[in-house]
Amino acid sequence: MSFLASLPDRVPAGVRIGFPEATEPRTAAALALLESAGRIRPVHIMDSVASIAHAARGAGGPEIVSTSNRERRRAALSTCPDLAPSGEGDALRFAIAMLAAGDLDGVVAGAVATTAQVLRGGLSILGPASGIQTVSSAFYMVIPPADGDSERVLTFTDAAVVPQPEPEQLAEIADSACRARELVVGDEPRVAFLSYATRDSAGGAAVEPVVEGLKLFRRRRPEIPADGPLQTPPWFPESRCGRPPARRSRVGPISSCFRIWMQATSPTSLCSAWVELARWARYCRDCRLR
């Protein structure tokens, strides 16, 4: 079973997930699928006007919570005293406050709200998890099987929150991403710290924090294989490019390294990684066509 197909079965039945952007078209389409599957309990969180219009579509539909509901609002205000007095236009923060109060098990947002708005709401109402000093983000990219290779799942971090991390932050971001991967993907992470240099091939202000961050991460999590600094091309599976990579790494054979997550130290290096991946994907396609 593929990674994406396995996700619904790993969700505990009956969890309540809040959707403060339920009327947004993509979110509405996703909600229709979730409601038909019946495994989770989506909660549509809307201001009073939208909730009345939504409820008018028919009885027996999803649970709808209005931000002007007095009882819900009283509970939300206990965790977020600075909610807008009327609740209008504050569905995101209202949903996060419900999560903090224990009325929800999770919140899905970001189709309408910006990343900054979602992060600020979470930080101001929930705060970081215990022991977390550096709040970061990660996303998962699924590489479909090809030429006998199995499906690979990559975790990229940090994608949007810490543009220029210090070495200590790099180590903590790496640790957080590994812990999240163990929960989300369920395998044993292997870590590559990306840079424009491979190991000692170059130096400079952009490479030195990666080198130091790797050292600090190895002290924090010595049981996890980690290597760096590394460029993207040496990590592309040789079965997909028709030739061995320029260098091998201590984190395992190249053919299985795409299970790891990769660390880009800045937006520029992350963009460079994507450019290199695109170049190598095009090269591999050409190899298969020959």
Image (cartoon, grey):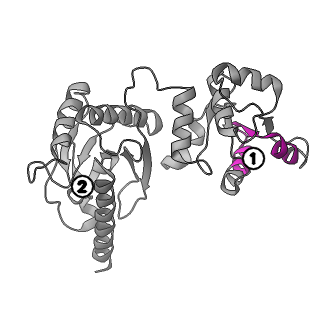
221 lies above or below 55: above
* Front in this rendered view, residue 20 or 148: 20
Of 28 and 123, the residue lying toward us: 123
Indicate whether residue 281 is drawn in magenta: no
Dot 1, crowdedness within 10 Å: few (<14), some or many (≥20)? few
Which residue matches tag 2?
A: 235
Q: In which quadrant will I find the C terminus?
A: bottom left
Left or right: 109 with respect to 277? right
| Closer to the camera in the image, 214 or 269 | 269
Residue 229, horizontal then vertical, whole percent: 18, 47
Which disc number belongs to residue 36?
Answer: 1
Left or right: 242, with 160 as reference point? left
Q: Position of residue 4 (x, y in %)?
A: 52, 49
Look at 61% across and 41% down and name the residue there.
108
Q: Which residues are magenta?
A: 31-54
Mark 1 lies on a secondary structure that is helix
Residue 19 seen by the camera: no
Q: Position of residue 128 (x, y in %)?
A: 47, 26
Report the side of 147 relative to 55 (left or right): left
